[in-house]
């Protein structure tokens, strides 16, 4: 799916984290760089979603490596303490 970054910010998906927080996946352009951003957003008092400090942004050129690592994480069984 081609993404038009002319608007510099495209929401690709949202994953509920808990009752107050959402993980938002975006593509955006920042200082000329094409970025993928996974960030925790929270519900503010006015009801709007606001970006929090927790998150990760990386260049689109790193996307395949990140996906490969996440696929490996899916296959690793949980460690019992």
Image: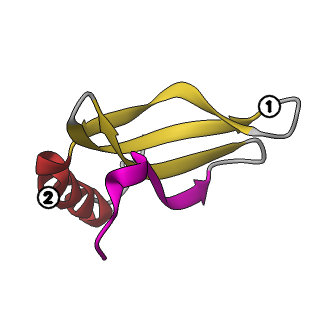
Which image quarter is the C terminus in?
Answer: top left
- What residue is rendered at 48% in x and 39% in y? 39
| Mark 1 neighbour density, 10 Å: few (under 14) some (14–19) many (20 or more) | few
The outermost residue toward the bottom is 1
Q: Is residue 10 left or right of residue 45?
A: left
- What residue is rendered at 70% in x and 47% in y? 18
- Colour scheme of this structure image? secondary structure
Range of magenta residues: 1-16
State the mark number for residue 64. Answer: 2
The outermost residue toward the front is 6
Q: Which residue is mark 1?
A: 44
Magenta stretch encompasses residue 13: yes
Q: Tag 2, which secondary structure? A: helix
Depth check, front residue: 18 or 12: 12
Q: Tag 1, which secondary structure? A: loop
The outermost residue toward the right is 46
Q: Quadrant of residue 72?
A: bottom left
Q: Is residue 62 left or right of residue 16?
A: left
Q: Residue 68: where, in percent of width, then height?
A: 16, 60
* Label 2 vs 1, first from the N-terminus: 1
- What residue is rendered at 78% in x and 47% in y? 19
- What residue is rendered at 42% in x and 44% in y? 38
Q: Quadrant of residue 31?
A: top left
Magenta stretch encompasses residue 17: no
CA distance separating discs 2 and 1: 33 Å
Q: Quadrant of residue 3?
A: bottom left
């Amino acid at each position: 799916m081609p993404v038009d970054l002319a608007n510099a910010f495209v929401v690709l998906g949202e994953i509920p984290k808990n009752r107050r927080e959402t993980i938002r996946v975006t593509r955006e352009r920042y200082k000329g760089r094409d970025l993928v951003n996974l960030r925790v957003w929270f519900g503010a008092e006015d009801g709007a979603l606001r970006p929090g400090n927790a998150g990760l942004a990386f260049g689109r050129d790193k996307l395949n490596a990140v996906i490969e690592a996440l696929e490996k994480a899916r296959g690793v069984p949980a460690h019992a303490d």
